[in-house]
Amino acid sequence: MYGDMNTDTQMALAELLERYPVLRDCSEDIVKAYEILFECFKGDGFLFTCGNGGSAADADHIVGELLKGFVLKRPLSEEDKNKLNSFGEPEGAELAQKLQMGFRAMSLMSQTAIFTAAGNDLGGDMGPAQQLNALGRKGDVLFGISTSGNAKNIALACQVAKLRGMKIIGLTGYKGGRLASLADVCIKVPAGETFVVQELHLPVYHALCIMIEKSFFNR
């Protein structure tokens, strides 16, 4: 099941399943989602996240874990540190010491100006799709989160992702809904009630973020 994952990445998944044995039936799809994310970031691709309500907060949360160090330190390369110091500015040394490496990721739910403009001018469900239409490229990934799997704005964004040649990861409740049929892989946690689904979503995406971080920085 673990394929080419390194030992630390395998351990991160094993720890998730030990703490949340109810997720064991999701393990194969979690690995597939990891593989999609790994290939995306390996190729310098971009991850876009989206969701509604609590899932919008989760979309932001995922990006927050990826843009800076999560469970590991991610210092700048020596080349970057040397460049910052060579500028001769007083801020260079502070940046060289404090900045961390990150993955290219963005929440489609947090861009207030374009989100509201698209909703007003194009329709209330068009915000994520319009952003993705402008920004998405082949090699990028859309991570859609929906407890029911049937959110219209997520489905619209998935159509644009397909148009742009992107991969799609879905995260839903046990029914999967429309998102399960649109995604390249859909992690369907074994719950149906919204708040329970959301409680299981968090450890899943935390584990994915840890697995990705350990693949690129724990060396």
Image (cartoon, rainbow, N blue to C red):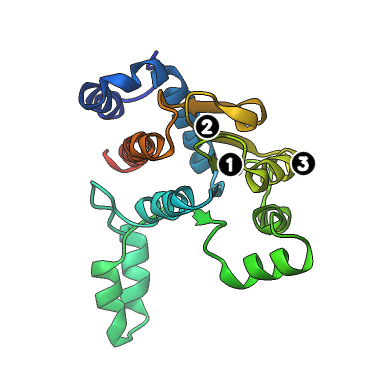
Q: Which residue is mark 3?
A: 163
The x and y percentages for residue 190 are 40, 23
Q: Secondary structure at mark 2?
A: helix
Say which mark, if any, is on residue 36. Answer: 2
Hey, what amino acid is under mark 3? Answer: Leu
Which quadrant, please, contains the C terminus? Answer: top left
Q: CA distance from mark 3 to mark 2?
A: 18 Å
The x and y percentages for residue 161 are 69, 42
- Using the rendered view, name the quadrant where residue 10 is placed: top left
Q: Residue at x 53, y 51 (%)?
A: 52
Q: Residue at x 31, y 39 (%)?
A: 210
- Using the rendered view, name the quadrant where residue 77 is placed: bottom left
Q: CA distance from mark 1 to mark 3?
A: 12 Å
Q: Residues within 10 Å of mark 3 (few under 14, many from 20)?
A: some
Of marks 3 and 2, which one's residue comes earlier in the chain?
Answer: 2
Q: Residue at x 56, y 46 (%)?
A: 45
Hey, what amino acid is under mark 2? Answer: Ile
Q: CA distance from mark 2 to mark 1?
A: 8 Å
- Using the rendered view, name the quadrant where residue 16 is placed: top left
User: Does the rendering let one see residue 41?
Assistant: yes
Q: In the image shown, does 43 or 204 lie closer to the viewer? A: 204
The x and y percentages for residue 69 are 29, 53
Seen in the picture, residue 184 relative to 124 is either above or below; the reply is: above
The x and y percentages for residue 189 are 42, 26
Q: Nearer the viewer, mark 3 or mark 2?
A: 3
Q: Which residue is mark 1?
A: 141
Q: Residues within 10 Å of mark 1 (few under 14, many from 20)?
A: many
Marks 1 and 3 in Cβ contact (< 8 Å): no
Q: Secondary structure at mark 3?
A: helix
Of marks 2 and 1, which one's residue comes earlier in the chain?
Answer: 2
